[in-house]
Image (spheres, helix red, strand yellow):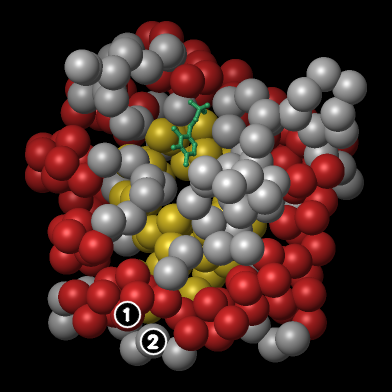
Amino acid sequence: MNPSISENLTAIRARIRAACAAAGRAPDAARLLAVSKTFGADAVRAALDAGQAEFGESYVQEALPKIAALPRGRIVWHYIGPIQSNKTRDIAAHFDWVHGVDREKIARRLSEQRPEGTAPLQVCVQVNISGERSKSGVAPEEAPALCRAVAALPRLRLRGLMAIPAPAQPGEDARAPFRRLRELFESLRRDGLELDTLSAGMSDDFEAAIAEGSTLVRIGTAIFGQRHYEQ
Ligand SMILES: *Cc1c(COP(=O)(O)O)cnc(C)c1O
């Protein structure tokens, strides 16, 4: 048992419930995805022992041995990193969810490569909500067409939208990008797409995201500590 991981989880869960309450939402309206990238299987196990069941990973190479080392049936694995074409087969075979789908070609590959006999891969379409040129994610105006394409693929199940807004600058409204994401989500639902997941908010901005309707916050640093990347 790693005391700091379980204490951090307890503290984050309390903050999530408080943010939901402050927004007039049910206390469990936003669920917690623990982002374990760069941390080992032992850290994931500590969080699992503390009652955390959903984990997010951003690097396929790093994730596969961790997934193999941990009890498969007790964990829901989310792939939240950028998706390269040559990694779709591993993602389709080893993950339950994928959050970064931003091209139809990638969606088609994931559907074709999702193994028979497994549940459909749960998909969030990533939206470039801050309009940064360098960032991945589909432009908001192109999201409806991509969502329809994903919804039509047999081995995928479209669940919602995901975004990583640029950090708010001093004086900026931290909620603004999350509000635009929610408005897009609601307009897609009005157009008949069955979406139930708004994947938004990280360690530094999850309360703003919850205030704007996030149903799933992706939190790494505040649970596991600072990440150290190997060179
Ligand atoms: C790393 C990562 C997170 C977690 O970020 P923290 O700031 O450590 O909470 C969330 N979402 C995505 C897509 C990430 O890559």
Please tell me how crowded label 2 is: few (under 14), some (14-19), or many (20+) other residues with Cα within 10 Å: some
Residue 93, picture quadrant: bottom left
73 with respect to 136 (left or right): left
Q: Nearer the viewer, mark 2 or mark 1?
A: 1
Label disc, if present, on residue 140 of the rendered structure:
none
CA distance for labels 2 and 1: 7 Å
Residue at image location 46% in from the left, 27% down from the top: 220
Q: Quadrant of the N terminus?
A: top left
Question: Where is 208 relative to 92, above or below?
Answer: above
Residue 213, image x, y percentages: 76, 52
Question: Where is 145 relative to 16, above or below?
Answer: below
Residue at image location 17% in from the left, 60% down from the top: 86
Does the CB distance between marks 2 and 1 fall below 8 Å?
yes
Q: Residue furthest top?
A: 3
Residue 51, image x, y percentages: 41, 34
Identify the element where label 1 is drawn: helix
Front residue of 157 and 138: 138
Residue flagged by tag 2: what amino acid is it? Leu
Front residue of 167 and 66: 167
Kindly identify which residue carries mark 2. 153
Residue flagged by tag 1: what amino acid is it? Arg
Task: Confirm whether residue 197 shows in the render.
Answer: no
Which circle's residue, 2 or 1, is located before the other in the chain? 1
Residue 225, picture quadrant: top left
Question: Where is 79 relative to 193, above or below?
Answer: above
Identify the element where label 2 is drawn: loop
Kindly identify which residue carries mark 1. 108
Residue at image location 47% in from the left, 64% down from the top: 102
Residue 155, picture quadrant: bottom left
